[in-house]
Image (spheres, helix red, strand yellow):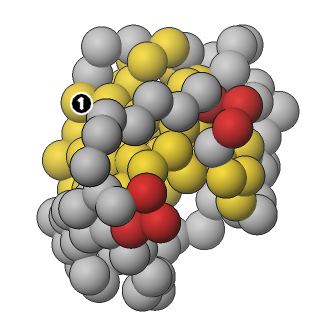
Amino acid sequence: MDAIIKAIKDAHLLDLPGRESRQILSSNDGASLTVRHVTIPASGDKREFHFHSDSNEYIHVLSGEGAFTTETGSKPVSAGDTIFVPKGLKHFTANEGQKDLVLLCIFETADLGAHG
């Protein structure tokens, strides 16, 4: 197998509320994990709590300012921050700034499926 280089514009656009989420890598590409590029606009809707029952999630904030929220509270996040989300933890990320909040999300499974 050769290396894969994929431009964001060529990544699969997912239908997720209040954000633009592009799946860059997954099992469709022969990868052993899932990588998504997520843009939450300043006017983006707040997302409902959700969880991933089949994978831990790693969120790296590329730009912008926001809040990462779990059932126990909310913490501010900004460019350069990395969040570890254990599988099963209810959470959501919201834009709290004036510019887009841009995230790189990595999941430990190539076939991300189960959400609660």
Q: From the viewer's perspective, tell me whether residue 103 is left or right of residue 83.
A: right
The residue under the point 26% across, 69% down is: 109
Say above or below: 33 vs 40.
below
Judged from this view, the residue extending furthest toward the right is 43
The residue under the point 72% across, 31% down is: 9
Which image quarter: residue 94?
top right
Residue 38: percent from the left, percent from the top? 58, 39
Residue 28: percent from the left, percent from the top? 47, 66
Which image quarter: residue 75?
top left
**Near-viewer residue (93 or 62):** 62
Say above or below: 109 vs 24.
below
Say above or below: 78 vs 68.
above
Which residue is denoted by mark 1 in the rendering? Answer: 82
The residue under the point 29% across, 84% down is: 53
Secondary structure state at the residue bearing disc 1: strand
**Near-viewer residue (108 or 45):** 108
Which image quarter: residue 82?
top left
Residue 74 visible in the snapshot: no
Residue 92 visible in the snapshot: yes
Q: Amino acid at mark 1?
A: Thr
**Near-viewer residue (98 or 34):** 34
Q: From the viewer's perspective, tell me whether residue 100 is left or right of residue 54.
A: right
**Near-viewer residue (63 or 34):** 34
Q: From the viewer's perspective, tell me whether residue 72 is left or right of residue 42.
A: left
Residue 39: percent from the left, percent from the top? 64, 33
Give the crowd class for mark 1: few <14, some 14-19, many >=20 residues within 10 Å.
some
Judged from this view, the residue extending furthest toward the front is 1
The residue under the point 18% across, 47% down is: 84
Count numbered badges in the picture. Answer: 1
